[in-house]
């Protein structure tokens, strides 16, 4: 109750709920006083108020009656006081506000369905090294997405910038306005602005059809409500009984684990947005192994009265996963599809338009059932993980990403959600950014560095990678400069420093040879590093930056690749060596090398700044060495003193025969240390010596592996004034030397192995992609809408784009249900457009309904074009005599000369005709029930279409009759009974119906006002049975005549008892090898089957007299439970009743296990599931026969134990097991005798033959 008291000096007024309730005259003033202001208690008499108080206000002025009424209206019912428009972003940054962007290409082959999905929330789940950069805000607020025209709403579920040493982890949801099923969708992710506000807008991601979206990533121990609803409805959830350990790793990010022991749940308070009466979609990721009999809820909300389900998704018992609506209407699937301990995506859909309930597992519809179209609603809370009103229905497992929508999600939408969320890496590809000025080049290639060749943890900073390739594209003298000046390298958005050691464009007749060193800022040990090589600019200056390749830890790098002149140092020190008599330009390990003989040397000198003297500091020397021969004296390939105890310095010395290498350091005062290891003559060896002063060790590495280590704790400073020399005069070096490097740090063992792997076998260190063009062309995304003259969309028309003179077709597409086609990657030019429509009755007529008179400029990033077509639409609405919409049939519409359109009547009795906007059309309504004999159809109505754009309402002479067949005593219904309905009218039509598992059959045909007189007979396993029918005949008869006027139901009882019916039941329980049938991938498997419907008169060598009409097979991957292949099995020529098929295993995955299920069908009879085999596509080739008949002898062998069990026909059931081995060249037969069988049955044995 809202109360207001006012006093204006002359009147006291009291208002109740906005209206004046009391008024009295009163004069005088209210004297000031020192009494306390109290709420809920009167001061003088101490009277207490019993009740609730809220929103107390005191004014020093008198509010008008209008003001008071307005306050009441606003506060009592705010929802009706105002309306809230759809969400809009209030900020719109410029592309220039960001430093970087990446293109994300969504693979259209992973987008199921037709046309485009509108406002689809795509999951972007990536680990990215560029987002690990400090230029990106640590909370990801400067991450934004665009479709090149507008900023896309997005929600960041997770941004962990320090996911590991090299990469950040981003989990985001991005609303894609139009996600195409036919063409790749390209968006961009922008980032890199340290000061901007948050760019995410979650409410915009989840449109009005989403009533609740809970990522379940929050900690249950946080203040309530803990679990945030990402939609604009704010249906946040509160943890009930949940604690922090219940938050576990999920399918997407975080999730909640339930255990069916503590009555836990996430409670979402009732809100009108969660009440859904018609279309409903529920979805969640779950993980469980539960098999008990309890009902367990994933998500549910009750309707009124209490305990009647508005919607309910969960496990019903030990067998079924069920989606309920409207209390009892449901669709179920086998629980085995999800209780294997793996993550599974479950979607329940209530589709009121098509009167269907659908249940999807992992993107595939697994079952459907009838839905009345309306569900009960109520005011209960929504629960995740437990029933809202029934205790102890807690889920036993993990739940993630729960969504509730008031729309019937399509097959394509559900499958696309699964594809995106199950394997986001394959759903899209993330482009490596072009750095600035990349379009100065014509081409680029991606180079992927294999992280498995890089040992260790984390990453290596500033690692110089060798790129040593021969390449045909670099051979192109028209595009690439002769000296390679226009070759450059990048990683993501950054140019990389590089040095070209060799570029020989005319290496051979077809290829160029490039040897380059590229500095990688972070070379990852756990994720492949991707760089790009750019080229193709005949006029640019050199892109090399040689000295920056070698960071400050390198004291000298000598490639020794020169063919003459000085031995250049590539570091910033530039300590070039003087060459004395050495043969240069020889073939080396990397590129060129120096060949030393006696009395030849390279003298680098002793730099004045002492950077080659390390005192008591650590350093590393690496080089490639090839010793020519035994010179009967030590050889010194690298020397700076140290060869004797009284000579300070360091050197690398061989043994006298050249087969041992001995790194040496000496402090010149008697302390000298060396270690030695073997090398081979006339062979290239990578050698690294590490002086580790931290641990007082000298360590030697050969070909990447450590081979020796000695203590140097006694050695003091080794600084000296000797020149650094390659080959020293005292002990001349005879051999080849390549790639000498000296560093002032301790190189780790993993760094050294990585250097060796890269330089020894560069081809296996990375892979080089194909040439790609850098395209400067501007592109658009274009949506073309086709509408008729009345503004209605026109689906299924062909919309084509041509260049501006109609010479060449550019693109074309078929309009979706909304009359739209979306074209992507459109070059911004002028185009003409044509819209055509086809008839759907042979011969096909095509008419042009729109052709633009002049070219239209397409120049916006996203552009919408609407074409009005010369088309009108007529809608037919058809009901039967009971007022029930005609649920099937078709309407043929034409003109006086030809038929044009076959218009299907949908389940709501509606059909739509679209064609040119002219007069002179006529129509005929046709109907044929699914059970009606082939070729028998009736015309229900006909007439002329007199007005374009009108609705035509028709009532036709049809009605519905429901039959239920019972046993004689009425104790049970009977399935598989054939009802033969013969029309006694002149046309003599025959209708065949077969009762379902509940003994029911539905007859939908003409009523008595028009040929509605029938005779009925019953056939059970092809015997006519006597029966009576309620309200028509009380005596048992084999034929009954009756007339049908309107909707009615009949109960039929026929002459057989329950026990007699039981004898007609056949079930083959299993016929399964215990071990797998193992088959070579690439071989062929032959399946053969012979199944018969049982009857006493069967021939003695058969299981029964009636062969199956049809046999089919289905191959299912046991890991994913996805059907990968299925089909019918044709009958084998010359073998009556035997069906077969071939399975080519090269269509399957190798090293995988499949279920192969064979099923049989016989019209008018109920046949159970027949045969299931397990195939392991792995080892032996096999042709398998399940039949009495032999095939030719095979040339392969199968050695496996086989276990089979059979449940026989009739009342008595026994199981028999036999185990044996199938040996080479032996015909094995496993017989399962069933002796205790009624003499009325012919079955004596089942044979399962496998022939070698």
Image: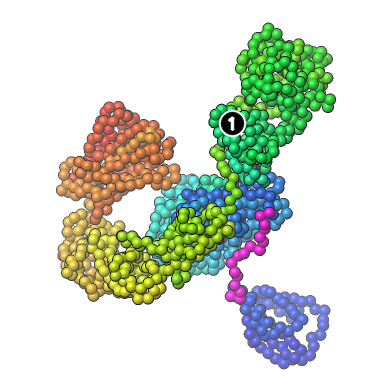
Q: Position of residue 784 (x, y in %)?
A: 50, 61
Is 1245 located above or below residue 820 in the figure? above
Q: Position of residue 305 (x, y in %)?
A: 47, 69
Is 862 located above or below residue 64 in the figure? above
Q: Quadrant of residue 905?
A: bottom left
Is 558 located above or below residue 382 in the figure? above
Q: Is residue 864 magenta?
A: no
Neighbor class of circle 1 (other Cα within 10 Å; few <14, some 14-19, many 20+) is many
Q: Quadrant of residue 896?
A: bottom left
* Image quarter of the N terminus: bottom right
Left or right of 898: which side holds 430? right
Q: Position of residue 709 (x, y in %)?
A: 69, 20
Which residue lies at the image location 64% right of the left edge and 49% below the top edge? Answer: 101
Which residue lies at the image location 61% right of the left edge and 40% below the top edge? Answer: 536
Q: Is residue 662 visible?
A: no
Q: Position of residue 1242 (x, y in %)?
A: 18, 45
Q: Is residue 142 visible?
A: yes
* Image quarter of the C terminus: top left
- Where disc 1 sits, the SS reads strand
What is the tally of numbered marks visible in this picture? 1
Q: Residue furthest top?
A: 632
Which residue lies at the image location 23% right of the left edge and 63% below the top edge? Answer: 936
Q: Which residue is mark 1?
A: 512
Left or right of 471: which side holds 1104? left
Left or right of 1150: which side holds 745? right
The magenta span reads 80-96
Which residue lies at the image location 60% right of the left edge and 58% below the top edge? Answer: 149
- Predominant secondary structure, magenta span: loop
Identify which residue, 143 or 230, lies in the foreground.
143
Is 517 located above or below residue 831 in the figure? above
Identify which residue, 1161 or 646, lies in the foreground.
646
């Amino acid at each position: 109750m809202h109360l207001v008291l006012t006093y204006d000096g002359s009147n006291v007024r009291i208002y109740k709920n906005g209206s004046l309730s009391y008024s009295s005259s009163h004069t005088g003033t209210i004297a000031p006083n020192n009494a306390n202001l109290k709420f809920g208690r009167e001061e003088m008499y101490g009277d207490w108020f019993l009740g609730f108080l809220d929103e107390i206000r005191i004014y020093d002025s008198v509010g008008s009656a209008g003001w008071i009424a307005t306050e009441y209206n606003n506060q009592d019912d705010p929802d009706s006081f105002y309306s809230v428009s759809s969400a809009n972003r209030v900020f719109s940054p410029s592309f220039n506000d960001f430093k970087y962007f990446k293109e994300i290409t969504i693979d259209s082959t992973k987008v199921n369905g037709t046309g485009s999905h509108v406002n689809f929330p795509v999951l972007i789940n990536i680990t990215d090294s560029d987002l690990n950069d400090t230029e990106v805000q640590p909370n990801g607020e400067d991450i934004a997405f665009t479709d090149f025209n507008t900023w896309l709403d997005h929600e960041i579920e997770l941004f962990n910038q320090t996911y590991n040493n090299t990469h950040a982890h981003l989990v985001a949801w991005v609303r894609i306005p139009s996600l195409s099923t036919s063409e790749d969708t390209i968006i961009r992710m922008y980032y890199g602005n340290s000061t901007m506000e948050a760019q995410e807008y979650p409410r915009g991601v989840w449109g009005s059809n989403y009533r609740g979206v809970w990522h379940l990533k929050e900690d249950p121990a946080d203040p309530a409500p803990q679990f945030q609803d990402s939609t604009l409805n704010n249906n946040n959830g509160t943890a009930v009984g949940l604690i922090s350990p219940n938050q576990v790793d999920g399918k997407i990010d975080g999730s909640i684990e339930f255990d069916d022991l503590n009555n836990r749940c996430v409670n979402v308070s009732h809100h009108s947005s969660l009440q859904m009466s018609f279309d409903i979609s529920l979805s969640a990721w779950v993980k469980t192994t539960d098999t008990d009999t309890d009902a367990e809820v994933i998500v549910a909300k009750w309707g009124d009265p209490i305990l009647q389900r508005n919607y309910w998704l969960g496990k019903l018992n030990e067998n079924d996963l069920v989606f309920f609506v409207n209390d009892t209407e449901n669709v179920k699937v086998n629980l085995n599809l999800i209780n294997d301990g793996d993550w599974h995506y479950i979607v329940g859909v209530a589709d009121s338009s098509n009167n269907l309930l659908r249940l999807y597992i992992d993107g595939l519809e697994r079952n459907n059932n009838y839905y009345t179209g309306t569900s009960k609603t109520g005011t209960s809370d929504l629960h995740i993980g437990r029933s809202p009103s029934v205790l102890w229905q807690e889920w036993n497992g993990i739940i993630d990403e729960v969504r509730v929508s008031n729309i019937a999600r399509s097959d394509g939408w559900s499958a696309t959600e699964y594809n995106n969320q199950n394997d986001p890496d394959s759903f899209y590809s993330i482009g490596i950014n072009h750095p600035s000025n990349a379009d100065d080049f014509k081409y680029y290639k991606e180079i992927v560095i294999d992280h498995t060749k890089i040992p260790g943890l984390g990453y290596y900073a500033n690692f110089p990678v060798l790129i040593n390739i021969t390449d045909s594209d670099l051979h192109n003298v028209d595009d690439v400069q002769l000296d390679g000046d226009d070759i450059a390298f990048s990683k993501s958005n950054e140019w990389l420093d590089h040095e070209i050691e060799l570029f020989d464009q005319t290496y051979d007749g077809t290829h160029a040879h490039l040897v380059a060193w590229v500095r990688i800022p972070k070379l990852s040990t756990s994720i492949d590093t991707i760089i790009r090589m750019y080229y193709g600019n005949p006029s640019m200056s050199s892109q090399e930056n040689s000295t920056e390749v070698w960071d400050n830890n390198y004291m000298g790098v000598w490639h020794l690749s020169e063919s003459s002149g000085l031995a250049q140092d590539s570091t910033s020190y530039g300590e070039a060596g003087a060459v004395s008599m050495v043969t240069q330009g020889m073939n080396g390990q990397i590129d060129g090398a120096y060949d030393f003989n006696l009395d030849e040397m390279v003298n680098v000198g002793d730099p004045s700044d002492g950077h080659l003297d390390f005192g008591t500091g650590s350093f590393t020397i690496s080089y490639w060495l090839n010793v020519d021969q035994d010179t009967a004296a030590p050889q010194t390939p690298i020397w700076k003193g140290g060869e004797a105890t009284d000579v300070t310095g360091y050197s690398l010395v061989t043994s006298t025969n050249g087969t041992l290498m001995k790194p040496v350091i000496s402090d010149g005062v008697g302390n000298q240390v060396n270690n030695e290891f073997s090398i081979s003559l006339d062979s290239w060896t990578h050698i690294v010596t590490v002086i580790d002063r931290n641990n007082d060790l000298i360590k030697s590495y050969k070909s990447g592996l450590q081979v020796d280590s000695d203590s140097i704790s006694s050695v003091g400073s080794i600084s000296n004034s000797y020149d650094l020399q390659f080959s020293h005069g005292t002990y001349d070096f005879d051999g080849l030397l390549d790639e000498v490097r000296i560093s002032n740090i301790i190189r780790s063992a993993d760094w050294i192995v990585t250097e060796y792997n890269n330089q020894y076998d560069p081809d296996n260190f990375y892979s080089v992609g194909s040439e790609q063009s850098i395209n400067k062309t501007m592109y658009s995304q274009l949506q073309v809408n086709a509408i008729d003259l009345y503004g209605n969309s026109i689906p299924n028309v062909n919309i084509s784009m041509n260049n501006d003179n109609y010479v060449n077709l550019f693109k074309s597409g078929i309009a979706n249900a909304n009359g739209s086609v979306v074209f992507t990657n459109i070059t911004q030019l002028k185009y003409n457009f044509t819209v055509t429509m086809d008839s759907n009755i042979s011969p096909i007529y095509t008419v042009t309904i729109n052709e633009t008179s002049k070219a239209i400029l397409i120049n916006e990033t996203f552009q919408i074009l609407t074409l009005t077509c010369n088309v009108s639409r007529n809608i037919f609405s058809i009901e039967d005599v009971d007022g029930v919409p005609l649920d099937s049939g078709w309407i043929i519409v034409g003109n006086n000369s030809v038929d044009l359109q076959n218009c299907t009547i949908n389940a709501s009795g509606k059909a739509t005709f679209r064609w040119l906007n002219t007069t002179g059309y006529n129509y005929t309504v046709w109907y044929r029930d699914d059970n009606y004999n082939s070729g028998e159809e009736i015309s229900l109505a006909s007439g002329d279409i007199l007005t374009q754009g009108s609705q035509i309402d028709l009532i036709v002479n049809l009605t519905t009759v429901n039959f239920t067949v019972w046993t004689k005593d009425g104790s049970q219904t009977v399935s598989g009974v054939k009802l033969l309905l013969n029309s006694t009218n002149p046309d003599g039509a025959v209708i065949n119906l077969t009762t379902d598992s509940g003994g029911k059959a539905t007859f939908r045909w003409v009523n008595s006002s028009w040929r509605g007189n029938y005779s009925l007979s019953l056939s059970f396993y092809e015997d006519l049975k006597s029966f009576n029918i309620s309200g028509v005949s009380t005596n048992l008869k084999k034929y009954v005549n009756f007339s049908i006027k309107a909707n009615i139901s009949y109960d039929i009882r026929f002459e057989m008892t329950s026990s007699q019916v039981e004898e007609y039941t056949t079930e083959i329980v299993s016929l399964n090898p215990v071990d797998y049938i193992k088959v070579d991938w690439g071989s062929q498997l032959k399946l053969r089957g012979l199944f018969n419907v049982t009857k006493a008169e069967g021939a003695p060598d058969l299981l029964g007299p009636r062969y199956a009409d049809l046999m089919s097979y289905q191959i299912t991957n046991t890991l994913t439970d996805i059907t990968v292949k299925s089909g019918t099995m044709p009958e084998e020529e010359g073998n009556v009743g035997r069906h077969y098929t071939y399975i080519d295993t090269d269509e399957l995955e190798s090293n995988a296990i499949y279920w192969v299920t064979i099923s049989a069908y016989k019209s008018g009879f109920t046949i159970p599931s027949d045969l299931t085999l397990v195939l392991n596509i792995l080892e032996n080739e096999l042709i398998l026969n399940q039949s009495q008949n032999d095939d030719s002898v095979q040339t392969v062998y199968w050695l496996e134990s086989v276990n089979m069990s059979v449940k026989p026909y009739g009342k008595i059931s026994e199981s028999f097991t036999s185990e044996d081995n199938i040996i080479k060249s032996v015909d094995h037969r496993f017989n399962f005798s069933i002796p205790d069988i009624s003499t009325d049955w012919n079955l004596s044995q089942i044979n399962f033959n496998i022939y070698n």
